[in-house]
Amino acid sequence: MPAPRTAIGVCYGPRCSDFGSREMAEELKQLGLEVEALDCQSLCPHAPAIRVTDRFIHRATVERVTGYLAQKAQESQAKKQA
Ligand code: FES
């Protein structure tokens, strides 16, 4: 059974777009991740803002997003084994 896909919310607001959020969204899609476009999240000073599962990553990069996903997957696996 394939792992469930994680919807990632990428802010497409003007400030985050200026800081590359739309290009990051395309990179994340190319990695096979489901990406949802979001309006401004009032996190503009922390642009680009990307929501991953239960939290927003400030000044996001693709590496920070994928790292967080890997961390959550490890935590989930550890819970299953406990
Ligand atoms: S433009 Fe992205 S949080 Fe405002």
Image: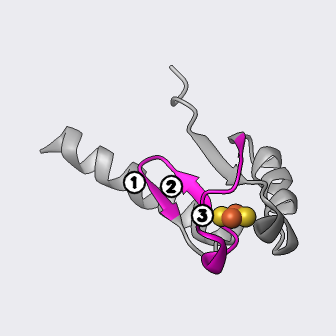
Nearest to the observer: residue 2 or residue 21: 21
Image spot of residue 58 (x, y percent): 57, 73
Q: Is residue 28 above or below residue 42?
A: above
| Quadrant position of ligand 1 | bottom right
Residue shown at 53% from the left, 52% from the top: 52
Query: What's the residue type where badge 3 is placed?
Result: Ser
Q: Which residue is mark 2?
A: 69
Give me the C-alpha separation between circle 3 and circle 2: 23 Å
Q: Residues within 10 Å of mark 2 (few under 14, many from 20)?
A: some
**Viewer-nearest of discs 3 and 2:** 3
Q: Is mark 1 within 8 Å of ligand 1?
A: no
Residue shown at 47% from the left, 46% from the top: 53
Q: Is mark 3 within 8 Å of ligand 1?
A: yes
| N-term mark: 3 or 2 | 3
Are circles 2 and 1 on residues that touch, CB within 8 Å? yes
Residue at disc 1, secondary structure: helix
Apparent side of residue 7 relative to residue 27 in the rendered image (left or right): left
Image spot of residue 70 (x, y percent): 48, 57
Q: Which residue is mark 3?
A: 42
